[in-house]
Image (cartoon, rainbow, N blue to C red):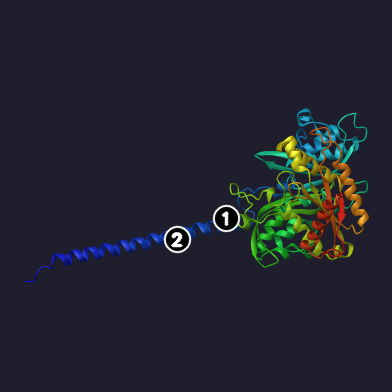
Amino acid sequence: MRQAAPTNSITLLETTSREDLHHQLYRYAQDLQDLMGQHVSLQQRHQQVLESLGSGEAHEDMLLKAMLQPDAMYLATNRLGEIEFISPAVQSILGTQTAAARGLSILAWLPAEQLLSTQGLLEQLGSGAGMGAIHQRKLDLQLTEHHAIPRSFNALVMQVRDQGQVRIYWMLDHAASVQANALDILKTFPFFETCAEGLTINAADATIYAVNHAMTHITGHAATELQGENPSKLGAGLQDAEFHKIFWRQLNSNGHWSGTLFNRRKSAEIFFSRTTVKAVKNDINDTICYLAAYDDKSSHDHDHDHDHDHGTGKMPQLTYHDPLTGLPNRRLLEHRLTMTMADPSCKKTGMYVLLLELSQLLAIEHKVGADLRDQVLREVSERLKTSVRRADTVARLDGGVFVILLPGVVDRNDAESVANAITIQLNAPFLSRREPFDLGIRFGGAAFPRNGDDVASVFRHAEAALRNAKHLGARLSFSAEQLQ
């Protein structure tokens, strides 16, 4: 007869079995967690692929987002052309307010020779035919008998679904006396260079005609490296032939395409980009070119950019623009300088950089308070923009320090003339006080490539010239040939 096992042996066996079981359950829980993580990752990747095929959920209109800058000139109407909103910039030009104009038809502001074509456009958009396209027009707006001469605008007209409602946006820009070709007109709209989104203008055969500075920042390519190229140069090669069939079918039938693309930077890094592409049509409804907007979705997803909005996942304008004035900030300014200096044509034609300091800004704040000081800075920014050419750049670094880039200006006298014009503008009374302020205007100027062949060198020369102006009690000083 076998003896029973000792009690302590049975207890040890049960304890060992329980520990093994707990260990196995722990491993199973870890494996299950890993599988759930992989499942979520696969779902996200699947959604990204669907989006890249244009089959995902509704996408934000990246082009509308790029166009609606704080100082943009535009009207918003319903499908009938009845005014719903007028931007502040247009209100000041046309001398009317949204409240006074709401419900009026934009047709009432047009001359007889533009009525039929505009009415036809409204009917076309109302029918839903190619509603996603951009329609390029020239409009002469005359609100009342007080405007003896109509104001001429280049207009980009597009119908979009905005916050659940269908609206027609009429983006406006001042029309030149001699009209350029349709593709160059697109480049003249201020949003093309001031928005944070990368923009490309593609000819009717899809080749890249022009890109903005933000696009060169996102891709790492200089503008000259992309002009004349097929958009496939930016592709990562992950969209197959079926994708391109769907893409062009939607673009041709609807006038637009939105989705997420797999793109490749110059460094060969692959990134996701939320993208909107719209056909641009003339007054006989022919497609004359395409306008596309891109952002860098990978930087949003991986939090590479500390300036992005964690609450919405959207890249705010703060990334490239000063929050108070809306002017390009140091980041965008340095990028524009770098890309401009890399352009061989700029090295031949040259460029002047003016550093402007308002040395009495702190005294103004002590006198009138911070809120009124900010209003003065905003007015200063508007005056600076109206004092320079469209090709020039005005940026705000911080406080009362601004930078004016004058590409193509090689003569010191011409740069001085710009500084004089700015001074006259800034010495005029301010609307906020109806009186002039002593802003303590000081300029320091430097030339590229004479004073340096990179951003840091040119800035050092401009800063040295500004210090010299303060030391001498002068309003303006230019850098010498060599910085000692």
Q: Residue 47's mark?
A: 1
- Closer to us: 224 or 325: 325
Amino acid type indicated by mark 1: Gln
Tell me the residue that label 2 is attached to.
Answer: 35
Spatial CA span between label 1 and label 2 = 18 Å
- Closer to us: 164 or 415: 415
Q: Residues within 10 Å of mark 1 (few under 14, many from 20)?
A: some
- Residue 211 seen in the figure: yes
Q: In the drawing, does residue 194 fall left or right of residue 111?
A: left
Sequence-wise, which precedes: disc 1 or disc 2? 2
| Residue drawn 17% across the image and 67% down it | 9
Write down the quadrant of residue 140 in the picture: top right
Amino acid type indicated by mark 2: Leu
Write down the quadrant of residue 54 in the picture: bottom right
Q: Give the structural element (helix, strand or loop) at label 1.
A: helix
Location of the N terminus (image quadrant) = bottom left
- Closer to us: 416 or 235: 416
Q: Are marks 1 and 2 in contact (CB under 8 Å)?
A: no
**Horizontal and vertical percent for residue 81?**
78, 35
Location of the C terminus (image quadrant) = bottom right
Q: In the drawing, does residue 416 fall left or right of residue 400?
A: right
**Horizontal and vertical percent for residue 130?**
74, 47
**Horizontal and vertical percent for residue 131?**
73, 45
- Closer to us: 140 or 129: 140
- Residue 208 seen in the figure: no
**Horizontal and vertical percent for residue 28?**
37, 62
Q: Is residue 147 above or below residue 387?
A: above
| 1 vs 2, front mark | 2
Q: Give the structural element (helix, strand or loop) at label 2.
A: helix
Q: Which residue is farthest bottom? A: 1
